[in-house]
Amino acid sequence: MAKEITKREDNYSQWYTDIVKKAALADHSAVRGCMVIKPTGFAIWEKMKDQLDKMFKDTGHVNAYFPLFIPKSFLSKEAEHVEGFAKECAVVTHHRLMNNPDGPGVVVDPSAKLEEELIVRPTSETIIWNTYRDWIKSYRDLPLLINQWANVVRWEMRTRPFLRTAEFLWQEGHTAHATEQEAIEESRMIHDLYAQFAEEYMAMPVIKGAKTANERFAGAVETFTIEAMMQDKKALQAGTSHFLGQNFAKAFEVKYLNSENKEEYVWATSWGVSTRLVGGLVMTHSDDEGLVLPPKLAPIQVVIVPIPKPLPELLEKGAQIAKLLRDKGISVKIDQDPTKRPGFKFAEYEMKGIPVRIGIGPRDLEKNQVEVARRDTKTKEGVSIDGIVDHVSKLLVDIQENLLVKAKAFRAENTHTADTYDDFKSLLDEKGGFIEAHWDGTTETELKVKGDTGATIRCIPIEGDKAPGKCMVTGKDSTQKVIFAKAY
């Protein structure tokens, strides 16, 4: 099975597509640009969703749900917002079909034209802030800390499963605050939360930073981002948190009476991560044999394979081991398929990225041991059945930590510094990866670099080299180095 995957070094894009398909994460859909998320892919997303949902609730947020459809007039109330999303919007114009009078099939009923056209949700700021106008009257109603789990539609022309699809799943938080400082602190807190989730659960190291004015979310005053490096050395924007100022509050007249009985506009944030994280997980850790999953997000953490086949005594011992592991909160599958050879099964479970495989045969039973193999390093060893629970528990922790260490080392190895524009272009062509360089802060220079090289400023790092210098392109003063890279 592993031989069917294109090697990363031969065609990284095809390698990614092969893994998504052969590890049964997603499939193509009858609708162009959309995907069917298969049970394994959806189970990974559920693990992500459950952990993030807990983190949100632990910080005081609650879940709600808002409509999929947004009146077109709402979108035009915030000028930058409509400009940023206009080209990606799907629009509903009619509400009924009729039999085609000129032949087979159905057509739109011209008499069923909507009085106002509806936008299929590309993001929910407008309809949520229209609602908040009715919910917020006094400082006692603040802060309002709401998140929703939903789908959105952005009509992308070039799509790739999980990374960029016309419809995708995500969460979007929308909060309202009495003061500017509270809103800024909220957006930064969520920014930190996303980075914590990426590193602690995905084992995917990220750089925290702010977007340039040109790259900010449409309608935001400030956009904070986490940027990750994939194995092809391109950047992936993995999550964003936006300080919206009072832009949407003013557009939708959302005001409150403060403690002195004076009317003020509220301050806002919005923030979100999506099923794009599943794609990021694949591209951060997987290899030429298939998917590699960090244990904290693996739907199945351990698979038990009777060798050479599922004999009754092997299944009985496997069930005993599985119960002990499950009692410790470890998810386990016992392979009971009598039709496939062990070698095929091993390759199949490598493809699916299950972190730990336990092989058990008649001779193992005689020795009171099993063979334990780890997916990340492909090493294996004999382990006493009496100590299997402690061994596997520690092994899962070690695999999780090893994947993060390995990904950090890869990023460090592929992060470079450029002092001149010629050096920058040479590094980008010959090595790729993240390039730290000074920038003069102008959109003109930013767009020139993008036009010349295809690289964009991924972020202005919050941590890192803060020393002032000279822009690599113009020689003008620069306050600090920024991160350039080609990106998804």
Image: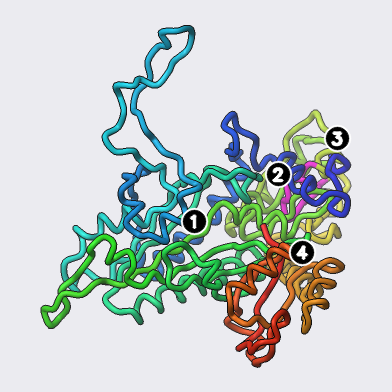
Mark before the other along the chain sequence, 2 or 4: 2
Quarter holding the N terminus?
top right
Q: Mark 2 points at which residue?
A: 20
Quadrant hosting residue 417: bottom right
Name the residue type under label 2. Answer: Val
Tag 4's secondary structure? loop
Pick the quarter of the image with the C terminus: bottom right
Q: Give the range drawn in magenta.
A: 348-360
Counting residues from the N terminus, which is met first, the one under dot 3 or under dot 1? 1
Q: Position of residue 31 (x, y in %)?
A: 57, 32
Question: What amino acid type is highlighted by mark number 3?
Answer: Arg
Measured Cα–Cα span from mark 3 to mark 1? 36 Å
Q: Mark 4 points at which residue?
A: 233
The residue pinned by badge 3 equals 341
Q: Distance between the residues labelled 2 and 3?
A: 24 Å
Residue 394: horizontal and vertical position, in percent?
70, 67
Q: Nearer the viewer, mark 2 or mark 3?
A: 2
- Is residue 438 visible in the rendered image? The answer is yes
Q: How crowded is mark 3: few (under 14 residues within 10 Å), some or many (20 or more)?
A: few
- Of the two numbered discs 2 and 3 on the same chain, state the one appearing first in sequence: 2
Residue 100 location, quadrant? top left
Image position of 375 (left or right of 294): right
